[in-house]
Image (cartoon, rainbow, N blue to C red):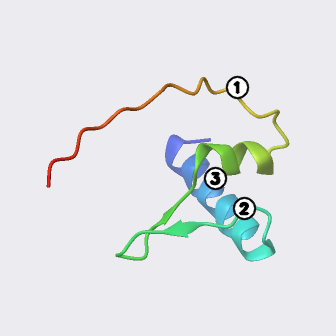
Amino acid sequence: MSLQSTSVNQLALLRRWDKEGRLVAKRTLSHHRYYDESDVGQALLLPPKNKKKTPCATNLRI
């Protein structure tokens, strides 16, 4: 099986999951599909990653 046919099969799977509502695609302004890593993990029934919450500080001058 070639790399191209594998990627075509993967795209078809993502489109099918989007149609079924299993993995809903987000869209860019130009209507391209994209998926968040957390959404893909949920669709694949993977446990969530433990993300360290880092403090964020900003200085705004108006």
Residue carrying label 3:
10
Mark 3 or 2, nearer chain start:
3
Q: Could you tell me which quadrant the C terminus lies in?
A: bottom left
Q: Which mark is residue 50?
A: 1
Kindly state the secondary structure of the residue where label 1 is placed. Answer: loop
- Label 3 SS: helix
Q: Amino acid at mark 3?
A: Gln
Q: Residues within 10 Å of mark 2 (few under 14, many from 20)?
A: many
Nearer to us in this view, 25 or 5: 25
Quadrant location of the N terminus?
A: top right
Q: Which residue is mark 2?
A: 23
Mark whose residue sits in front, 1 or 2: 1
- Name the N-terminal-most of marks 1 and 2: 2
Lateral position of residue 18 relative to residue 2, left or right: right
Task: Give me the residue at 35% from left, 76% from top.
Answer: 30
Q: Is residue 52 above or below residue 17?
A: above
48 shown above or below 16 = above
Circle nearer the viewer, 3 or 2: 2
Task: From the top left corner, tell me how far across and down residue 22 is, in percent.
Answer: 80, 64
Residue at the location (41% across, 32% down)? Answer: 56
Q: Is residue 5 left or right of residue 50?
A: left
* Image position of 43 with respect to 25: above or below: above
Q: Residue at x 22, y 46 (%)?
A: 60
Looking at the rendering, which quadrant does residue 52 occupy?
top right
Question: Which secondary structure, mark 2?
Answer: loop
